[in-house]
Amino acid sequence: MADEPPDEVEQLPELVIEGEATEETARQVADRAIQLVTTRFSGPLPPPAVLQAYDDMSPGLADRIVAMAEREQEHRHNLEDRAFNEDSKLGKRGQILAFIIAFAGLVAAVILGLTGQPVVAGIIASLDLVTLVTVFLIVPRMGETSSDEES
C-alpha cells in the first residue's frame, strides 16, 4: 500500500530514543518525502475540477450541486427583499402615526388656547414642536453614524 509510511519512518522515533538510529537509517528516511496537500474553497460552489470529479463519480451530480446553489441564492435574495419591504412598511407606518400624534398635539394646543388656557396650550405646542424638530434633526444623524460604523 502506497499510503502507508515505510517501516523506517515508523521505527525512527523509537530508534532515536533508544540510540540505535544510524546515519544510514536517517538518510533513508530523509530521502523519502511525505507530502500533505490540503485544498480549500469558499463560496457556494466548489472549483470546476471538483465539480467534474463529482460528475465523474455520479453523472448529473455537478448539475444538481449547481442547481442547489442557485436555489439557495434565490431563497436568500427573497428573504432580503422581504425584510427590506417589511422595514419600509414599518417606517411608513411610524411616520403616519408620528404625524397623527403631532397633529393631535397641535390641535389640542389650539383648542386649549381658544378656551382660555394659554399657558397649557403653549407648553403642549412647545413640547410638540421640540419633539418634531428633534426627530427631524437628530434621528437622521443617528442613522448616519450607525451606517458609518457598519462600513
Image (cartoon, rainbow, N blue to C red):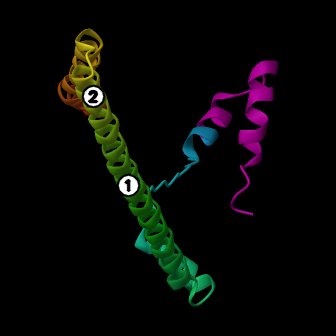
Q: Position of residue 112 (x, y in %)?
A: 29, 22
Which of the two residues, 108 or 95, is positioned nearer the viewer here?
108
Residue 61 relative to residue 142: left or right: right
Q: In this view, does 112 lie above or below 42?
A: above
Mark 1 surroundings: few (<14), some (14-19) or many (≥20) residues within 10 A: few
For label 1, the residue is 89
Question: Which label lies toward us, 1 or 2?
Answer: 2
Residue occupying the far top of the picture: 119
Q: Which residue is drawn at 32% across and 41% down?
A: 100
Q: Position of residue 17 (x, y in %)?
A: 78, 20
| Amino acid type shown at disc 2 | Ile
Labels 1 and 2: the sequence-earlier one: 1
Please provide the residue range marked out in magenta. Answer: 1-27
Residue 26 relative to residue 21: left or right: left
Q: Which mark is residue 39?
A: none
Query: Residue 87 in magenta?
Result: no
Total residue callouts:
2
- Kindly tell me whether residue 45 is visible in this rendering: no
Mark 2 surroundings: few (<14), some (14-19) or many (≥20) residues within 10 A: some
Which of the two residues, 10 or 90, is positioned nearer the viewer here?
90
Which of the two residues, 25 or 129, is positioned nearer the viewer here?
129
Secondary element type, mark 1:
helix
Q: Where is residue 141 in the image (x, y as percent from the top left)?
A: 20, 26
Q: In which quarter of the image is the N terminus?
A: bottom right
Q: In this view, does 13 lie above or below 83?
A: above
Secondary element type, mark 2:
helix
Q: Residue at x 32, y 46 (%)?
A: 96
- Kindly tell me whether residue 39 is visible in this rendering: yes
For label 2, the residue is 111
| Amino acid type shown at disc 1 | Lys
Cα separation between marks 1 and 2: 33 Å
